[in-house]
Image (cartoon, rainbow, N blue to C red):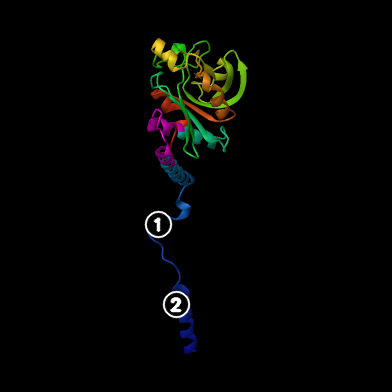
Amino acid sequence: MKKLMITLVATFGVATSYIPFENKNTVPKDKISTSEITSVNSSYLNKEKLSSAENLYKSLDFKGGNILQYDVFEKAINGFHQLKESGKLKATSELLTICDFSLSSNEKRLWIINTVTGEILFNTLVAHGKNTGEEFAEKFSNTESSLQSSMGFYITDQTYFGENGYSLRLRGMDAGYNDAAERRAVVMHGADYVSEEFTKKHGRIGRSWGCPAIPRALAKSIIDTIKEENCLFIYYPDQEYLSSSQWLKTV
């Protein structure tokens, strides 16, 4: 009997010796809320995107062209990813077109970037609307007949031949800022007044009726490159827009 009791005690000791103790500093999994997990995941993903944006920007070769400022690029690439995640932009899209309308219209302020290879496909002049400003853009509108440019994110659509020749339809993605683009017939097209020759004669390139007009000689090549669901971002440092666009929001 004594031997039996000793055996039972020994067995109990072995069985309980492997029960793990609870770390007082560890929060039980059932105590972590879904919102907290989502917040952590979102913060991690945003850091990953930032790192990716920095690496891509560092790989860009601006030799022979104008330099795109990083803060503009960062906003553009952030919106590019947000549009993809929302399903508004196809997941396979690689091209990002950026127009920096904070710069003089005499500068090459349009860039088309392959976000996979880091290659700058085009860097050229681009016009703003007649009532947006003279050499510099100052006023923007989403209203018909305003003859003003509209800032924000666009997705390129189909091509067509119109009054300005070969043209590219644009769909505005920012409500209240450029979502009237199709109704206003704001499109990308070539124009003779977007050239260095015009600048030498008039002191600035010409202006459109609100369209991001590009050099006539490059129009077909550019349009055929970015047509059919690629991202276009027209940047201007308008704080109201920058703080309200759903495509620029981060956690």
- From this viewpoint, is residue 204 visible? no
Crowd band around label 1 with a 10 angstrom C-alpha radius: few (<14), some (14–19), many (20+): few
Which is nearer the N-term, disc 1 or disc 2?
2
The answer to which image quadrant residue 136 occupies is: top left
- From this viewpoint, is residue 23 visible? yes
Q: Position of residue 242 (x, y in %)?
A: 42, 27
64 above or below 10?
Answer: above
Crowd band around label 2 with a 10 angstrom C-alpha radius: few (<14), some (14–19), many (20+): few
- Say which amino acid is labelled 2: Gly
Q: Residue at x 43, y 39 (%)?
A: 56
Q: Residue at x 43, y 17 (%)?
A: 196
Determine the CA span between mark 1 and mark 2. Answer: 26 Å
Q: Is residue 17 left or right of residue 83?
A: left
Q: Quadrant of the C terminus?
A: top left
Badge 1 is on which residue?
26
Asked if the magenta segment contains residue 245, the reply would be no
- Say which amino acid is labelled 1: Thr
Closer to the camera in the image, 12 or 184: 184
Magenta portion: prevailing SS class? helix
Span highlighted in magenta in the image: 52-76
The answer to which image quadrant residue 74 occupies is: top left
Q: Mark 2 falls on what kind of element?
A: helix
Q: Nearer the viewer, mark 1 or mark 2?
A: 1
Q: Mark 1 falls on what kind of element?
A: loop
Closer to the camera in the image, 51 or 247: 51
Q: Residue at x 48, y 84 (%)?
A: 7
Badge 2 is on which residue?
13
Q: Position of residue 81 (x, y in %)?
A: 50, 36
